[in-house]
Amino acid sequence: MTVIAISNQKGGVGKTTTSLNLGRALSYIGNRVLLIDLDFQGGLTLSCGINPDSLERTIYNALVGNEPIEDLIHNLKHFDLIPANIDLAGAEVELLNEIGRERILDETIKPIKDKYDFIIIDTPPNLGILTVNALCSADGVIIPVECKYLGLRGLSILLKTIEKLRKRIKPSLQIVGILPTMYERTAHSNEVVGELKEYFKGKIKIFNPVKKTVKFPESVVVGKSIIDYAPTSDVAKEYLNIAKEVEQWAKSHQ
Ligand SMILES: Nc1ncnc2c1ncn2[C@@H]1O[C@H](COP(=O)(O)OP(=O)(O)O)[C@@H](O)[C@H]1O
Ligand SMILES: [Mg+2]
């Protein structure tokens, strides 16, 4: 079984979209998948068709309240979900004084790991304790990057954080790759992808980009993945291809 964190401290780069659609694509090709929403904004929860504000219990209850994680799982049609909502906003502070605070999520998910082939964790847009917990639970991290202005500086801060975690806490943490998102057929998009490939050549895999399409925001409104909302679209195929590559990565890293 493989745990993948979807991470980038920049907001609006496609983390939540990738968590849902990579997760769904992995389930489509035959894997048992659990998605964990670790963002208090509950974007992933909402994208799965669940209103975060309507929930009494979320991942917060396991992380801070020590409740059994099994009780927090929602069995959806194509995968399972552990949701989040605004309650999780308090966790950043409440977990700070816990012993072994970086490993709470890792400990928490242990009892359910063997029920799944993949656990995908969506992270908030910061490098706080929740993101650190996601990274310390993960075998691999995927970094979505918008094909717009390339923030190499922001990216290098994330990579340094990963490097530190590897040294101090989680030596086995790997970077699966950088995923360029919201790709347009413009010189600028191509420049960004080209720069990424050049800069990380031989070090970090750059996935084939996911195109920009209004189908993503549309699919959120109806609470469906792109594979279920627009199965014949290019972007559905793109996430399926990414899922196959992630499956291969998982096989070669076990
Ligand atoms: N490939 C894409 N094409 C068009 N819109 C996208 C794409 N990926 C994400 N979006 C939209 O961009 C916004 C931000 O994406 P999201 O996945 O929520 O980013 P993050 O989780 O990093 O903040 C959302 O409205 C989402 O629907
Ligand atoms: Mg998000």
Image (cartoon, rainbow, N blue to C red):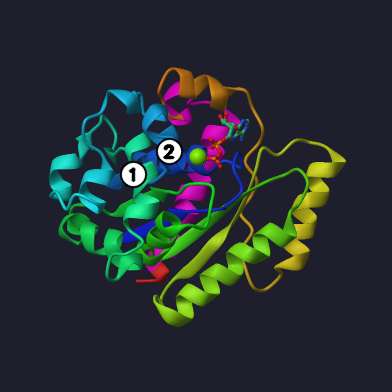
Q: Which residues are magenta?
A: 226-251
**Percent x, y of residue 69:** 17, 49
**Residue 47 locus on image (x, y percent):** 42, 29
The residue under label 2 is which amino acid type?
Answer: Leu
**Residue depicted at 28% across the width and 65% down the height:** 98
Q: Decide if residue 213 is on the left or right side of residue 253.
A: right
- The quadrant in which the N terminus is found is bottom left
The one of 200 and 25 positioned closer to us in this rendering: 200
**Residue 50 visible in rendering:** no
Q: Residue at x 20, y 40 (%)?
A: 73
Which residue bears the numbered disc 2? Answer: 20
Residue 213 seen in the figure? yes
- In the rendered structure, the answer to whether residue 217 lies left or right of residue 123 reads right
Tell me if label 2 and label 1 are in contact, CB under 8 Å.
Answer: yes
Looking at the rendered image, the quarter that the C terminus falls into is bottom left
Vertical position of residue 195 compared to residue 236: above or below? below
Q: Position of residue 92 (x, y in %)?
A: 39, 52
- Residue at the location (57% across, 52% down)? 9
Query: On the image, numbered disc 1 is attached to which residue?
Result: 35
Marks 2 and 1, the one that precedes in the sequence: 2
Q: Is residue 163 left or right of residue 203?
A: left
**Under tag 1, what secondary structure?**
strand
Q: Position of residue 208 (x, y in %)?
A: 64, 50
Q: CA distance from mark 2 to mark 1?
A: 7 Å
Question: Cβ of disc 1 within 8 Å of ligand 2?
Answer: no
* Residue at screen point 42% across, 59% down: 129
Q: Tell how many labels.
A: 2
